Amino acid sequence: MVQGFADAAPEASQITFILRQVPDPSPPSRVGGCRFTYLQADHPTSLRALLDAGIKTADAVVLGMNEELQSQVEADALVLASLLQVQDAVIASGRARAPHVVAKVHRFGTM
């Protein structure tokens, strides 16, 4: 996964992953021209985790969900809740413009 981000991100990017559990051994801190950091948090989209990860200066936020643990409807609900948490963190950080947000949504409507 790290290689995919390194391939897609601009040269000299700083990419921070907020994870419930950082893998052991730790993933690489540099791939190509990108630097990677890993922040462990019980709630990866909490205000504290997003502020600690640098939401104030982030160019983009990529939301990745563990799809194996929930249905598509539940996964989409989690994405929407996470978007609201990102919005709250952006407002709390005092930044003028929101970062780009990328997230996978399974369904275009709700039942």
Image (cartoon, grey):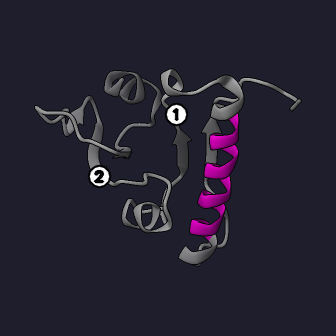
Q: Secondary structure at mark 2?
A: strand
Mark 2–mark 1 CB contact (< 8 Å): no
- Magenta stretch: residue 38 in it? no
The residue under label 2 is 39
Residue drawn at (66%, 62%), measured in percent from left and top? Answer: 87
Q: Residues within 10 Å of mark 1 (few under 14, many from 20)?
A: some
Write down the quadrant of residue 11 in the picture.
top left
User: Mark 2 or mark 1: which is in front?
Assistant: 1
- Of 50 and 12, the residue lying toward us: 50
Three-letter amino acid code at the position of disc 1:
Met
Looking at the rendered structure, which numbered label has been put on residue 65? 1
Q: What residue range appears in magenta?
A: 76-90
Task: Characterize the magenta stretch by its predominant secondary structure.
Answer: helix
- Of 49 and 28, the residue lying toward us: 49
Q: Quadrant of the C terminus?
A: top right
Write down the quadrant of residue 53 in the picture.
bottom left
Q: Residues within 10 Å of mark 2 (few under 14, many from 20)?
A: some
In the image, taking residue 24 as reference, residue 73 lies left or right, namely right
Image position of 86 with respect to 8: above or below: below
Numbered circles on residues, count = 2
Residue 49 pos. (x, y %)? 41, 61
Image position of 71 with respect to 19: above or below: above
Image position of 15 with respect to 72: above or below: below
**Mark closest to the chain's N terminus, 2 or 1:** 2
Residue 37 pos. (x, y %)? 27, 47
Three-letter amino acid code at the position of disc 2:
Leu
Q: CA distance from mark 2 to mark 1?
A: 16 Å
In the image, taking residue 24 as reference, residue 110 lies left or right, namely right
Residue drawn at (26%, 29%), measured in percent from left and top? Answer: 32
- Of 57 and 12, the residue lying toward us: 57
